[in-house]
Amino acid sequence: MRAAPLPSGDLVSEDFDRLPDPPWFFQSRLVKDSLLYARAVWECTVRPRAFARTWVTGEASWLNPLEMMAISVGLLSVTDRLLVGEAHGAVLTTIWGSLAPYVKYTLAGAVAYPLLRRRGGARGVSSTIAMAVFAGAGPGCLSRAFVLLGRAFGWWNVTFLQTHVRVSLALMLLSWVAAAPFFVALAGMLGGLHRRGWFQTVAVVLVAMLASSLVLTPIGIALKIPEFSSLLGTPTGGGGSR
């Protein structure tokens, strides 16, 4: 099929030259989703209870939890490849290493639901799991990025930890500081979702994460999935290899 004829020379030289450039950058779905991702990470970290309420009511437009997870997995996979390089393993292994923690988050949400559900409440288990995915894809990335950085510099090498005791203690403390935003955000979002207080939701989050670790650790050992064997799905492994 022949293409449509081009406009006349006058149109090209006058009208065409007056047309503004298409705003292709900010119309890109990738850019829009990246901006929404950054906004959601900020809101669920700084105002987790309000984030959960606006997500339920639809007062604000947020990414789907699965979209948040996909962006998070992509970011961590790229970061992993850049920091660790080819010696770390195959691309699929890298992607799986970023995706596997969400199995733990999903299970933790399922465990937390019956402990927080209000009698007669409309919030279901899917919304509770969604909050866990949001927390993992947002502030949870901080903890996993810290682990990737440690792998790149060999901080988690057994020999390094044994010969630098003070440094290893400092790194352990930093890893828990990096993990704190995840726990606080998840507790806050679950509190906003189920209208529960901070003390109860923090306790439930700790119980749910520990329970998911107890369930998944034997599976992780059997299937050689180290992400199942740590509290946040962020194994420190030795020497930068799985």
Image (cartoon, helix red, strand yellow):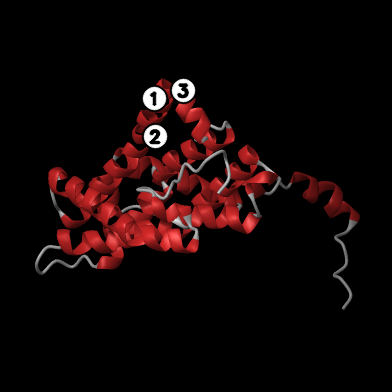
Horizontal and vertical percent for residue 179? 36, 39
Which residue does the image show at 57% across and 55% down from the upper left? 95
Which residue does the image show at 38% across and 31% down from the upper left? 172
Are discs 3 and 2 less than 8 Å apart at CB?
A: no
- Which three-letter amino acid code belongs to the residue tagged 2? Ser
Give the camera-side residue of 113 and 54: 113
Q: Is residue 30 above or below residue 119?
A: above
Q: Name the residue that disc number 1 marks.
A: 170
- Which three-letter amino acid code belongs to the residue tagged 3? His
Horizontal and vertical percent for residue 143? 42, 40
Point out which mark residue 190 bears: none
Residue 69 can be seen in this image: yes
Q: Name the residue that disc number 3 marks.
A: 164
Which residue does the image show at 78% across and 50% down from the upper left? 15
Disc 1 and disc 3: Cα gap in Å?
10 Å
Determine crowd level at label 2: few under 14, some 14-19, many 20+ residues with C-alpha closer than 10 A: some
Horizontal and vertical percent for residue 42? 38, 40
Disc 3 and disc 2: Cα gap in Å?
16 Å
Q: Tell me which label, 1 or 3, sits earlier in the chain.
A: 3
The residue positioned farthest toward the left in the image shown: 119
- Which three-letter amino acid code belongs to the residue tagged 1? Ala
Q: Tell me which label, 1 or 2, sits earlier in the chain.
A: 1
Q: Element at badge 1?
A: helix
Give the camera-side residue of 30 and 130: 130
Q: Element at badge 2?
A: helix
Q: Name the residue that disc number 2 marks.
A: 175
Determine crowd level at label 3: few under 14, some 14-19, many 20+ residues with C-alpha closer than 10 A: few
Q: Is residue 202 above or below residue 56?
A: above
Image depth: mark 1 or mark 3 in front: 3
